[in-house]
Image (cartoon, helix red, strand yellow):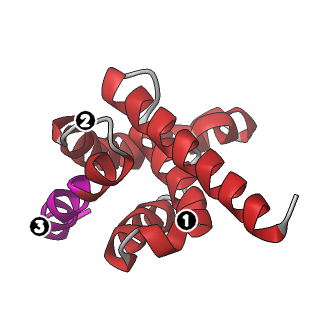
């Protein structure tokens, strides 16, 4: 396999995973915040195909929640400490979830991802946490 073929495979795999995560969010099978973290990481693999503004939004969500015990991290937190963070998790997720689920759930990778970004950025900039 050539280097170009390898890169094409990496991009295709990342795109497929982003679509899978997006569909899981829209169907309610996965929470928004862990999804944003994973998508943020995957976007680096396809950066030339996604506007930098879109990458920054997911990176921002991932960064703003990096101190929150989300997903499998929850099991490693003491119950009392988690209770405090759970309020922040619920608050931030309540902002992100409607924005994502209201976004256009199109089959096309670029359409489903890129049409979501401007609405999320606008809405998130209006909120105080």
Q: Secondary structure at mark 1?
A: helix
Give the residue number, with chain letter if any, for mark 1.
46
Quadrant housing the N terminus: bottom right
Residue 122 visible in image:
yes
Q: CA gap, disc 2 to disc 3?
A: 24 Å
Which span of residues is magenta-colored? 115-129
Question: What residue sits 48% from the left and 58% below the top?
Answer: 65
Give the residue number, with chain letter if any, for mark 3.
126
Q: Nearer the viewer, residue 124 or 22?
A: 22
Is residue 125 found left or right of 111 in the rendered image?
left
Question: x, y percentage for residue 6?
Answer: 78, 60
Is residue 129 found left or right of 86 in the rendered image?
left
Question: x, y percentage for residue 2?
Answer: 85, 65
Question: x, y percentage for residue 66?
Answer: 56, 61
Q: Is residue 96 above or below residue 7?
A: above
Is residue 89 found left or right of 108 in the rendered image?
right
Q: Nearer the viewer, residue 26 or 11?
A: 11
Give the residue number, with chain letter if any, for mark 2.
105
**Location of residue 126 (image quadrant):** bottom left
Dot 2 alpha-carbon crowd within 10 angstroms: few under 14, some 14 to 19, many 20 or more:
some
Residue most extreme to the bottom: 52
Name which of mark 1 and mark 2 comes first in the sequence.
1
* Circle 2 or circle 3, nearest the eye: 2
Q: Secondary structure at mark 3?
A: helix
Question: x, y percentage for residue 68?
Answer: 54, 52
Quadrant housing the C terminus: bottom left
Q: Is residue 27 above or below residue 113?
A: above
Q: Nearer the viewer, residue 48 or 29?
A: 48
Say the numbered circle drawn on residue 73. none
Determine whether label 1 and label 3 are within 8 Å by CB: no
């Amino acid at each position: 396999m050539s280097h170009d073929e390898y890169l094409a495979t990496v991009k295709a795999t990342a795109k497929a995973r982003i679509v899978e995560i997006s569909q899981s969010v829209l169907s309610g099978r996965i929470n928004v915040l862990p999804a944003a973290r994973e998508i943020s990481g995957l976007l680096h693999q396809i950066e030339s195909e996604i506007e930098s503004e879109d990458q920054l939004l997911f990176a921002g969500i991932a960064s703003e929640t990096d101190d929150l015990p989300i997903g499998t991290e929850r099991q490693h937190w003491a119950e009392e400490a988690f209770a405090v963070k759970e309020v922040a998790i619920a608050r931030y997720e309540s902002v992100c979830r409607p924005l994502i689920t209201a976004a256009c759930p199109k089959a096309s990778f670029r359409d489903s991802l890129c049409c979501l970004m401007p609405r999320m950025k606008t809405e998130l900039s209006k909120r105080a946490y």
